[in-house]
Image (cartoon, grey):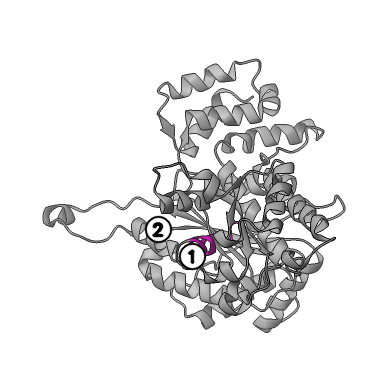
Amino acid sequence: MHIFISYARNDKDEPWFQALITQMKSLDIPYWMDTKDIPGGRNFSDEINTAIKQASVYVLVLSPSFMASDYIKINELPCIKEYKDQRIIYPILGIDCAYKTKYEWLAALQLGDAKPLQTLTTDLNTRLKEIATELSQYMQNANQPAALPDRTASNDCRQMLSRNLLPYMPDRSELIQEMSLALLNFKKNQAGKPLVWIIHGNDNQCHYDLMDCIEGCYWERFLYPTSKDKPGLLRYRFRNSLPYQYETNQWRDLVAMELKHKFDIQKEAPEDVFDAINRRCDKASPVMLYDVVDTDQWQKHGIQTVCQRFIDFWNQWPGMCCQNPLIVCLLVRYKSFPVSLWQRLFRSRKKDPNLEFKETILTLKNREACCVFPELPDISKKDTEDWYHNYKNYIDPYCSGKNVSQCIEDIFGDANQKFPMQSLAREIEQKYLI
């Protein structure tokens, strides 16, 4: 993981730009620039696209030359914008320019001290130290491994965690990092709408157990740390999560009715109910509404139609000015769709609903406050070895002296073999954890 620096070549030799790079180097911040990181003979555009995808933070060095660059406009900014709800975008005003006029989505991002670096003299070094310190903190948060809860809890609590959570934690670090970056972005930019998270994978990836891990292990320790006197994540199963047969306005009333009872709100009008939830997020704690839905449910009512209604609704949510986020999390399970004899005989070209869903949600990535996370993968031997290495001190006490490394060898055998989370967790839980 690194910081991707998007800049204009005309600014590279400016004293303030060189001073910025020096400050980043002084804190050992990993950063990527085309002029230093593309080897000779490589495809320029492919290397830049790969670097953007692999970055945790995007630094945009704004200037008139940046605004005038066709390459930045056509190739870099569209890719960066695609990840704007999953990564940190950190604009720096190098030279004063009309960036708010040309790129409206950049206008909503916090610039910190909005004075152009070019105009600073005695204060330049202080400002650059502040920038480098913030970027260093973002990278530390992005690269920090997800931590398990303290072992100072009671034996009963530790036993419960070992049995119910530990087996479902291999190879979820990428997802947790993506969530962490989305939440950091929320804190930095104070997004005015609920965060919509879409997590998807086949029905053997243990979606419900993943939610238990997020609430029980990752949330306060890694994703959204809070002081001890404040409650952590308030998580609720949301039964009316999708507007299947209903138009947006009809669905709005159903959602308001469910939330009114779930949150014990003494209001009737949908707008009053939604405002009450916003106030709770502002004064109390983060709220997550979640549901697990199967692709065959979406198929019956039209995947694109349901997605459009869903996004429209949450984009119309009353404006939020909250310290804590309201997260709407959909966990989508890909179901198997058997091919009938008729379809095999006549080679029907009916579209695979799972593929149609994947294609549809890709179009949501550019929507405001909608995070489409990578598909939940099967677990490899290396993923499991990394899990054991990272959490060895937590795992060993529950293994009755068994050689876990050898156990992993026994499970996989072939180094290239992969298991769905459900199968791997069952092996770990039943055979190796007491």
Who's the residue at 53% across and 77% down the image? 251
**Dot 1: what SS?**
helix
| Of the pair 41 and 243, the residue shown nearer to us | 41
Task: Report which residue position mark 1 lands on.
Answer: 78
The reply to whether residue 325 is visible in this rendering is: no
Let me know if residue 57 is in the magenta part: no
Amino acid on which disc 2 is placed: Lys
| Of the pair 167 and 106, the residue shown nearer to us | 106
Amino acid on which disc 1 is placed: Pro
The span picked out in magenta is 76-87
Mark 1 closeness class: few <14, some 14–19, many ≥20 residues within 10 Å: few
Task: Point out the image quarter for the C terminus.
Answer: top right
**Dot 2: what SS?**
helix
| Cβ–Cβ under 8 Å for marks 2 and 1 | no
- Position of 199 relative to 109 (above/below): above
In front of the other: label 2 or label 1?
A: 1
Task: Point out the image quarter for the N terminus.
Answer: top right
Task: Report which residue position mark 2 lands on.
Answer: 358
Who's the residue at 70% across and 37% down the image? 148
The image shows residue 341 at horizontal and vertical percentages of 17, 52
Determine the CA span between mark 2 and mark 1: 20 Å
Q: In this view, does 196 lie to the left or right of 221?
A: left
Lower position in the chain sequence, tag 2 or tag 1: 1
- Position of 152 relative to 120 (above/below): above
Who's the residue at 51% across and 80% down the image? 248
Let me know if residue 80 is in the magenta part: yes
Who's the residue at 59% across and 72% down the image? 105
Q: In this view, does 380 lie to the left or right of 329?
A: left
The reply to whether residue 160 is visible in this rendering is: yes
- Position of 361 relative to 18 (above/below): below
| Of the pair 51 and 234, the residue shown nearer to us | 51
The image shows residue 362 at horizontal and vertical percentages of 43, 61
